[in-house]
């Protein structure tokens, strides 16, 4: 009889371990405790190395973002304030589960996500498909669990999913592993977003929202479409930034500078920046005094 009880106990223990149900209690950074499954330990160690504090995120917040004033106001109201003050914004007034930033390459998706982390004084995790998909069955789900576990531990935290369409593609339905990954992500997102005291917000970026899994799309509560600001906004801003960086003044007025840039058609800020740089080189080559003395 004792033998049978021992065998049953051993089988029961093995089942618990295999299912990853043994929870360990780990002290959190604010001294409280968060339970987790031990089966994701190795993934946790990996994701811990991706966490950046708002100070590590290189930038000055909204100051770095040219134009897009109404988008910045919207994100400030709906995401930044609720993340920064979870004690005031709880329940329904807590931050959205997810934000989708869509737009052509070079329209500031990554820049805006980083700026939000600075403004909200939150941690930041930059995640691509390579970090969460796996060729081993079940490993992708574990990494998603670990990702949310780590994000919650470092809350308030922004999980930035770059090129989200390659992490959760629409055609994932035919592929067991992609389907399991999407389901796990949905469950984690729904579960963690209930805890508004420890805000974790997913910011997803894409160049093509038609390619994103529909269930993931529906959970990205805020959808923001970005386009390139016009040259009258970009040129003066870039010149001022250049002056501050190099501690110089600029001789030409904003109007002269704009006039000197004869081809204002740009789809993205990267191209605009390259065009402005090229036009400035031409002005300098033609003997026009662009830069003045060192700023005091
Ligand atoms: N609104 C903006 N204000 C200031 N700089 C910008 C703005 N939009 C883009 N940039 C600048 O353009 C470059 C590209 O921006 P960013 O990497 O954020 O674009 P992206 O939308 O994430 O592009 P991709 O789809 O290629 O990842 C960066 O140097 C960034 O600082
Ligand atoms: Mg980007």
Image: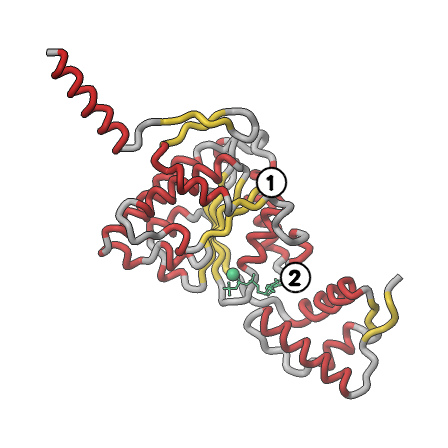
Residue pictured at 12% horizontal, 16% vertical: 4
21 relative to 83 in the view: left or right: left
**Which residue does the numbered mark 1 point to in the structure image?**
81
Q: Looking at the image, do the residues carrying marks 1 and 2 touch, with CB atoms under 8 Å apart?
A: no
Q: Is 270 placed left or right of 220 in the picture?
A: right
| Residue 189 visible | no
Evaluate whether residue 85 shows in this view: yes
Q: Residues within 10 Å of mark 2 (few under 14, many from 20)?
A: some
Residue in view at x 89 percent, y 61 percent: 296
Label 1 vs label 2: CA separation?
Answer: 21 Å
Q: Is residue 168 above or below residue 265?
A: above
Q: Position of residue 17 (x, y in %)?
A: 28, 30
Residue 236 spot, x, y in % from top left: 73, 68
User: Mark 1: which secondary structure?
Assistant: helix
Helix, strand or loop at mark 2: loop
For the residue carrying disc 1, how many other residues have a C-alpha within 10 Å: few (<14), some (14-19), or many (20+)? some
Label for residue 66? 2
Position in image of residue 169 (x %, y %):
33, 58
Q: Which residue is the extreme one toward the top?
A: 1
Question: Looking at this view, is 208 or 125 the one in front?
Answer: 125
Specify the quadrant that holds the N terminus. Answer: top left
The earlier-in-sequence mark between 1 and 2 is 2
């Amino acid at each position: 009889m004792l033998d049978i009880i021992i065998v049953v106990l051993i089988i029961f223990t093995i089942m618990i371990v295999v299912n990853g149900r043994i929870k360990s209690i780990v002290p959190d950074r604010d001294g409280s405790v968060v339970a987790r499954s031990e089966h994701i330990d190795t993934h946790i160690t990996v994701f811990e190395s991706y966490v950046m504090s708002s100070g590590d995120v290189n930038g000055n917040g909204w100051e770095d973002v040219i134009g897009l004033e109404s988008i910045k106001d919207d994100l400030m109201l709906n995401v930044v304030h609720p993340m920064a003050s979870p004690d005031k914004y709880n329940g329904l007034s807590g931050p959205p589960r997810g934000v989708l930033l869509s737009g052509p390459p070079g329209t500031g998706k990554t820049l805006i996500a980083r700026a939000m982390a600075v403004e909200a004084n939150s941690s930041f995790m930059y995640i691509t498909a390579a970090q969460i998909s796996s060729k081993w069955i079940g490993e992708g789900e574990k990494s998603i669990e670990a990702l949310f576990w780590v994000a919650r531990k470092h809350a308030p935290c922004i999980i930035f999913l770059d090129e989200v369409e390659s992490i959760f593609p629409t055609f994932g339905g035919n592929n067991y592993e992609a389907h399991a990954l999407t389901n796990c992500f949905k469950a984690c997102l729904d579960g963690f977003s209930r805890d508004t005291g420890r805000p974790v917000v997913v910011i997803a970026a894409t160049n093509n929202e038609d390619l994103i899994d529909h269930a993931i799309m529906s959970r990205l509560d805020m959808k923001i479409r970005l386009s390139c600001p016009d040259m009258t906004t970009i040129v003066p801003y870039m010149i001022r930034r250049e002056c501050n960086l190099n501690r110089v003044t600029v001789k030409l007025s904003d109007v002269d500078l704009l006039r000197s840039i004869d081809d204002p058609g740009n789809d993205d800020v990267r191209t605009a920046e390259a065009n402005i740089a090229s036009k400035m080189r031409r002005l300098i080559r033609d003997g026009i005094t662009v830069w003045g003395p060192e700023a005091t």
